[in-house]
Image: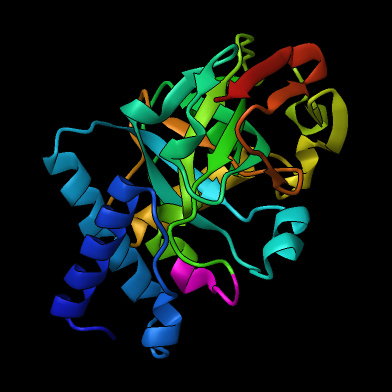
Amino acid sequence: MLSPEVIRQLADELAEADRAHGVISRITARHPGATVEDSYAIQGVWRDTMLASGRRLVGRKIGLTSKAMQQATGITEPDYGVMFDDTVYHSGAEIPVDRFSNVRIEVELAFVLKSPLEGPDCTLDDALAAIDYAVPALEVLNSHIELEGRTIVDTIADNAAYGAMVLGDVHKRPDEIDLRWVPGVLARNGEIEETGVAAGVLGHPATGVAWLTNKFHQHGARLEAGEIILAGSFTRPMWVTRGDNVRCDYGPMGVIECRFV
C-alpha cells in the first residue's frame, strides 16, 4: 500500500498533467507494489481536488467491460471513474483536441438514472428498473500516463482515462428497445473504422450499471438519481487528431457527429 503522502503527490501530478494536457511516467514503473486500492485512492484525491476547484460531478464512467477493449488494452477487469459537468458535449460539437492527451474515441451507451441504486446484490433487472433512459454516447479518452506498459493500476489512477463524452439526441427507455442489439458504426473522415453491437458489453450494456452499484457498496456509497452512467465501449478505441470528423451511426438510436479542432 502506498503512503498517504505518495498518494497525494501522484494525485497532484495527475492534476497538473490534466491542467497542462501532459503525460507523466507510469505509476507502476515508479511504485511496482501499488495496488488497485491505491489507484482508486489516488483517483479519489484527484477527484476531490477537482471538486474543490469548482467542477461538478454529473456521473460515472465504466471502462474495460468488453472483450474488444480488454484485448486492446491488455487489461481484463472493468474499472470506473468520474465525469464532470465541463466534459459533456452534444452531437454536432466542435471539440478542442488540445484539451486532451492521447486522444481516442469509443462507442458506448449512456444511462440516466431516475432513482438511486444500492448494492450489495444489484441485478441487471434492478439496474433496468432504475434507468430513466438510454442515450448513445461517444467517449473521448484522455490518458495522462504513458501508454506503453501501463496496468489497471495506472489506468484507474488516471480517472480510468476518461476525458469527455458526446451525447446523442435520441433517448430510449429500456422497455422501448432491446439494448443488446443497438449497433455502432464508427467512421473517421467518411471511412468506417470500427463496428460493434452493445451486447459486447458484458452481454447487456446495463450489466455494468449493476456491477458498478455493487462495487460502490463496498465503499459505503451508491449511485444517485440523475447521474449519467457511461457503460463501456463495444468497439476498440479509434485515434483522432485535429481536423478529424467523427460520425457514429447507432441505427434506431440515431447518429452522433463531432469534429476535433
Residue 17 located left or right of residue 153: left
For the C terminus, the image quarter is top right
Is residue 234 in view from this perspective?
A: yes
Residue drawn at x 48%, y 21% as measured from the top left: 89
- Position of residue 251 measured from the top left corner of the image (x, y, whole percent): 82, 17
In depth, the one of 241 and 78 nearer the eye is 241
Q: Quick one: 66 or 133, which is closer to the camera?
A: 66
Report which quarter residue 148 is drawn in. Answer: bottom right
Q: Does the stretch in magenta take in 149?
A: yes
Q: Does residue 204 sit above or below 250 in this rendering?
A: below
> Residue 17 lies in magenta, yes or no?
no
Q: Residue furthest bottom?
A: 33
Q: Which residues are magenta?
A: 148-154
Q: Quadrant of the N terminus?
A: bottom left
Residue 105 left/right relative to 111: right
Residue 19, compared with residue 54, is above or below; it is below
